[in-house]
Image: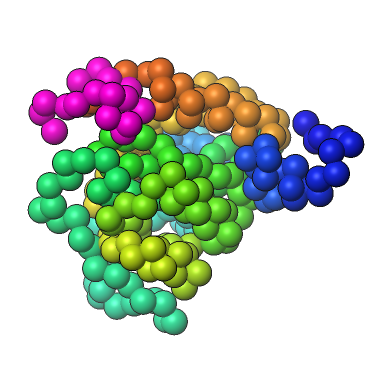
Amino acid sequence: MILQGHGLSLRGQLALLGLSNQSWYYQPVPETTLNLLLMRLIDEQYLRKPYFGVPRMTHYLNGLGHAVNPKRVSRLYHLMGIEAVYPKPRTTIPAEGHKIYPYLLRDLEIVRPNQVFTSDLTYIPMERGFLYLVAVMDWYSRYVLSWELSNSMEAGFCMEAQSRALNVAVPEIFNTDQGAQFTSEAFTQGLLDRKVAISMDGRGRWMDNVMIERLWRTVKYEYVYLHSHTDGMELWKGLNDYFHAYNHENPHSSLEMATPADVYYGRTKLSTK
């Protein structure tokens, strides 16, 4: 879908199409077929039971007939960017070289659009490899303001998603976990420059960022697990259609059967939120 004869560079054409450079140049990740299957099984079970650490996940996979050891499962956890949910010691100590901001949402009543944005990334399986998906969502309306795909967990694609979301609106608070992508100075500076208050969950505390974790379950069960994609461009097109439908067509029971776009843009006023 590259445009010919328009005088645009490849970077410019990708920007026009809403694609990141990383997603266009995606190369299949050199993992074995078995590892890709194990990662898919881990992802599905983790969505159901995010408190499963390496020992229990290893036991689960062994029970399915896959003779894997904890070392292998631990490597796949790291590759997928996941960890079990349980209280960890000394979670308030900042990562070396990065400031960790306090969690600002506890006991906060979220009552309007653009009050709180939340962001996270997740592993997305494909037919031959996998990508990472990041999204920025308005907490109150569940409206997905932006999203990006990448073949690595480096901060660049998270910053692209942040920039696109802030072009839509500037929130009062921006909430993430303590992943290296979100604690990087480049990511936080983009928020501080706009006077956005930064909120960060306790590491591994998915329930603190529960709204976007619910989004991941919805995206995976309603779209990702129902389709087989052979490359990043095919996945991008499918997700682009899905997120449009999610925002503008699919009613949400938690939004009194309105769509996220209806609530975000004020076309529907909620009586119970």
Task: Specify the quadrant that holds the C terminus.
Answer: top left
Camera-nearest residue between 91 and 83: 91
Give the camera-side residue of 35 and 200.
Answer: 200
Which of 239 and 231 lies nearest the eye of the viewer? 239
Compared with residue 13, is residue 98 higher up or lower down, i.e. above or below?
below
Dominant secondary structure of the magenta stretch? loop
Residue 204 appears in the rendering: no
Q: Is residue 241 above or below residue 124?
A: above
* Left or right of residue 143, residue 173 in this image: left
| Residue at x 29%, y 45% (from the top left corner) | 114
The x and y percentages for residue 186 are 50, 69
Residue at the far bottom in the pictured view: 97
Numbered label tally: 0
Q: Residue at x 21, y 41 (%)?
A: 112
**Left or right of 16 on screen, residue 121:** left
Instruction: Name the residue rendered at 13%, 52% in the picture.
Output: 108
Q: In this picture, is 103 found above or below 28?
A: below
- Is 98 drawn above or below residue 37 in the view shown? below
Q: Which residues are magenta?
A: 256-273
Q: Is residue 66 left or right of residue 202?
A: right
**In the figure, residue 198 lies in which quadrant?**
bottom left
Residue 181 visible, this angle: yes
**Residue extending furthest toward the right:** 5
Give the percent coordinates (x, y) of residue 83: 38, 55
User: Does the magenta segment cover residue 241?
Assistant: no
| Quadrant placement of the N terminus | top right
Q: In percent of the image, x 36 and y 52: which residue is there?
A: 170
Looking at the picture, the colour scheme in use is rainbow
Q: Quadrant of residue 89?
A: bottom left
In magenta stretch: residue 262: yes
